[in-house]
C-alpha cells in the first residue's frame, strides 16, 4: 500500500504515489558495489556519468515538465534546471581535475613523492524540494566521479523527480548498487543517516535539519558531513541613479522561484533618502508579476509555493510581522484558497524591536531603513546565517567596504543575490553551512588527499645517535671478514 503521495501544487492533482524504502538495504547495496566502483578507472567512471547526462538531455523536456508539475515552478525555469543537471557533468569533470589532481611533489633523490585522492566510500545524499534535480545532482555526480557509491533520498515532497534521476542512471547502464534511491519522510532520513556503514552525508536543506545532522555526527569525525543550508540574505540599496534597474534586481532576488531559494533576498536595507523612490518602483514591478500555473500563457514569473502547509506558514509569518509593528507595503494574499499560490508580500520592519532571524522560505521581503552605510553593513550582518549578500548602487569604495565586512559566502555588486555560477563554489558561513561549499568545490568533500613517499628499493641508515656496534657491523652491513 502506498504511503507516499506527491501532489501538484498548482492543481492539487495526485502526481505520484509510492512506498517508503528500506535505508539499510540501500546502504548494503551501495557498500557491496563500492569496491568495484572505486577500482574502476576514472575514465570509465566519467564515461558512465556522461551516459547519464545524455539520458537527461534526451528526455530534457519530459523532465522539465515533471519538475514544473511537482514543484509548481514555471516551465521556463524548470528548463534551466534541467540544463544545469546536464552541464554539471562536464563542470564536475573539470573540477575534479582542478581540485583533486594527481601530481608529483618535490622529493629526495631516488624517491618519488605523490599526491593522489581516494573516495570516502558510501555517501548518503539528501535532496531538497526547491531544485529537486539540480541540487542532489550537484552532490551525486562529483561523488560518483571521485569513486563513491550513493544512497539518494529525495525530498518526500518531490519523489517523482528523484525517481526520474534514478531511472536515468539505470538506463545509462550504471552498475548495480552504485546509485541507490530510498523514498520516505523524515523518519526514513533519520534511519538512513544513522546507518553506521555510511562514510558520509551530503545534505541540502533547512538549517534546522542541518544542525540536527551536525549534532548527530559530532562524535564521528571519521565521517564526512557537507551541509548546504539556508539563508536570511540581505540586499542593500544605496546611491544609484538607475532606480528601475535597482528595483528589478531586488524583485528578482526576492521573488524568483516564489522566494524558494536558499540565496533569495529576505531583507532589503535601504538608505533613508532613497527609500521612497526604491520602494515605489519595487512595488510597481511586483504588482506586475504574473503568478500562475507552470504552463500558463503568458508565462508566469512565479508559480505557487510547494504546498498548502508552507503557504499557511508564510501567511502566518507575514501576519506575525504586522502584529509586532511591521508596516505592510504590499500585503501577501492567497488568490486561490485551496491551492498554495501566494502574492509576494513586502513589509517595512524598521520599527520592530526584535527582527526574527529565521529563513522565511517564500515570497516575503522585509525592508529596513538606515541612515548611513556603516549601519547598512551592520544590519546586513545582523544574522546567524551567511550565505548570500548584495549591494545595489554605491561606489567602488562602498563595495570594497561591503565586500570586506560582509559575513557571507557570496558577495555581489549590482547583481542579484540568486543565480550563482556552477563554475564557482557555492556555500556560506554561520547557519548557512559547515565550510563545505558545493558546486565547483564539491570535489573537495567527495575525496580525501593521500600523500605517498615511494622508492623502488629500501635504502636507509641511521647517521647519528647510535652506540658502537659490538659485533663489528656498521650501517647495517655485515662485518668485514
Image (cartoon, grey):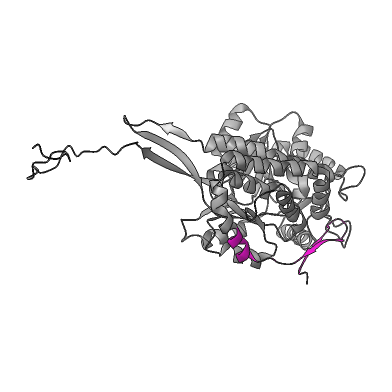
The structure residue drawn at horizontal position 60% and vertical position 63%, both measured from the top left corner, is 192
Q: As drawn, which residue projects farthest toward the front?
A: 481
Front residue (pair 398, 192): 192
The structure residue drawn at horizontal position 63% and vertical position 61%, both measured from the top left corner, is 26
Whether residue 370 is visible to the viewer of this picture, yes or no, is no
Rendered image quadrant of residue 442: top right
Tell me where the magenta segment starts and ends, as one range: 3-29
User: Is 103 located above or below residue 299 in the figure?
Assistant: above
Q: As drawn, which residue projects farthest toward the right?
A: 297
Is residue 13 on the magenta stretch?
yes
User: Is 445 located above or below residue 104 in the figure?
Assistant: below
> Residue 300, image x and y in percent?
86, 45
Front residue (pair 475, 53): 475
Front residue (pair 399, 99): 99
The structure residue drawn at horizontal position 53% and vertical position 37%, both measured from the top left corner, is 99
Rendered image quadrant of residue 474: top left
> Residue 266, image x and y in percent?
69, 48
Whether residue 264 is visible to the viewer of this picture, yes or no, is yes
Rendered image quadrant of residue 451: top left
The structure residue drawn at horizontal position 79% and vertical position 60%, both measured from the top left corner, is 307
Left/right placement of residue 480 relative to residue 150 reads left
> Residue 204, image x and y in percent?
64, 52
Left/right placement of residue 323 relative to residue 14 reads left
Is residue 226 on the magenta stretch?
no
Front residue (pair 234, 464): 464
> Residue 437, image x and y in percent?
57, 44
Amino acid at each position: 500500500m502506498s504511503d507516499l503521495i506527491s501532489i501538484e501544487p498548482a492543481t492539487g492533482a495526485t502526481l505520484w504515489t509510492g512506498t517508503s524504502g528500506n535505508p539499510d538495504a540501500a546502504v548494503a547495496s551501495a557498500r557491496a558495489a563500492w569496491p568495484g566502483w572505486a577500482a574502476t578507472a576514472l575514465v570509465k567512471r566519467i564515461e558512465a556519468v556522461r551516459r547519464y547526462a545524455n539520458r537527461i538531455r534526451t528526455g530534457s523536456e519530459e523532465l522539465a515538465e515533471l519538475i514544473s508539475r511537482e514543484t509548481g515552478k514555471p516551465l521556463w525555469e524548470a528548463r534551466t534546471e534541467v540544463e544545469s543537471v546536464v552541464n554539471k557533468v562536464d563542470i564536475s569533470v573539470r573540477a575534479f581535475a582542478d581540485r583533486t589532481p594527481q601530481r608529483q611533489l618535490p622529493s629526495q633523490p631516488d624517491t618519488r613523492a605523490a599526491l593522489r585522492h581516494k573516495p570516502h566510500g558510501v555517501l548518503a545524499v539528501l535532496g531538497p524540494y526547491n531544485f529537486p534535480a539540480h541540487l542532489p545532482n550537484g552532490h551525486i555526480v562529483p561523488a560518483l566521479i571521485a569513486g563513491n557509491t550513493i544512497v539518494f533520498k529525495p525530498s518526500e515532497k518531490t519523489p517523482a523527480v528523484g525517481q526520474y534521476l534514478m531511472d536515468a542512471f539505470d538506463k545509462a547502464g550504471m552498475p548495480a548498487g552504485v546509485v541507490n534511491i530510498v523514498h520516505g519522510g523524515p523518519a526514513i532520513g533519520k534511519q538512513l543517516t544513522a546507518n553506521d556503514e555510511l562514510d558520509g552525508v551530503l545534505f541540502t536543506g533547512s538549517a534546522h535539519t542541518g544542525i540536527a545532522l551536525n549534532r548527530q555526527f559530532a562524535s564521528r569525525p571519521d565521517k564526512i558531513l557537507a551541509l548546504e543550508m539556508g539563508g536570511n540574505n540581505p540586499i542593500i540599496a544605496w546611491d544609484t541613479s538607475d532606480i528601475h534597474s535597482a528595483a528589478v534586481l531586488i524583485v528578482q532576488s526576492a521573488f524568483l522561484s516564489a522566494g524558494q531559494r536558499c540565496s533569495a533576498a529576505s531583507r532589503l536595507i535601504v538608505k533613508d533618502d532613497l527609500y521612497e523612490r526604491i520602494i515605489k518602483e519595487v512595488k510597481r514591478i511586483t504588482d506586475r508579476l504574473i503568478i500562475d500555473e507552470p504552463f500558463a500563457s503568458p508565462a508566469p514569473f512565479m508559480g505557487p509555493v510547494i504546498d498548502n502547509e508552507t503557504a499557511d506558514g508564510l501567511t502566518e509569518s507575514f501576519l506575525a510581522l504586522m502584529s509586532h509593528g511591521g508596516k505592510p507595503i504590499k500585503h501577501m494574499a492567497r488568490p486561490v484558497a485551496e491551492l498554495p499560490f501566494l502574492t509576494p508580500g513586502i513589509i517595512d520592519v524598521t520599527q520592530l524591536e526584535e527582527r526574527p532571524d529565521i529563513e522565511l522560505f517564500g515570497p516575503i521581503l522585509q525592508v529596513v531603513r538606515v541612515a548611513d552605510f556603516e549601519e547598512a553593513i551592520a544590519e546586513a550582518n545582523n544574522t546567524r546565517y551567511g550565505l548570500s549578500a548584495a549591494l545595489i548602487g554605491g561606489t567602488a569604495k562602498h563595495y570594497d567596504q561591503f565586500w570586506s565586512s560582509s559575513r557571507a559566502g557570496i558577495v555581489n555588486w549590482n547583481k542579484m543575490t540568486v543565480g550563482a555560477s556552477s563554475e564557482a563554489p557555492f556555500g556560506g558561513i554561520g547557519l548557512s553551512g559547515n565550510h563545505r561549499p558545493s558546486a565547483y568545490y564539491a570535489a573537495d568533500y567527495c575525496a580525501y588527499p593521500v600523500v605517498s613517499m615511494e622508492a623502488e628499493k629500501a635504502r636507509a641508515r641511521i647517521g647519528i645517535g647510535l652506540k658502537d656496534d659490538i659485533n663489528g657491523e656498521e650501517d647495517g652491513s655485515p662485518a668485514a671478514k
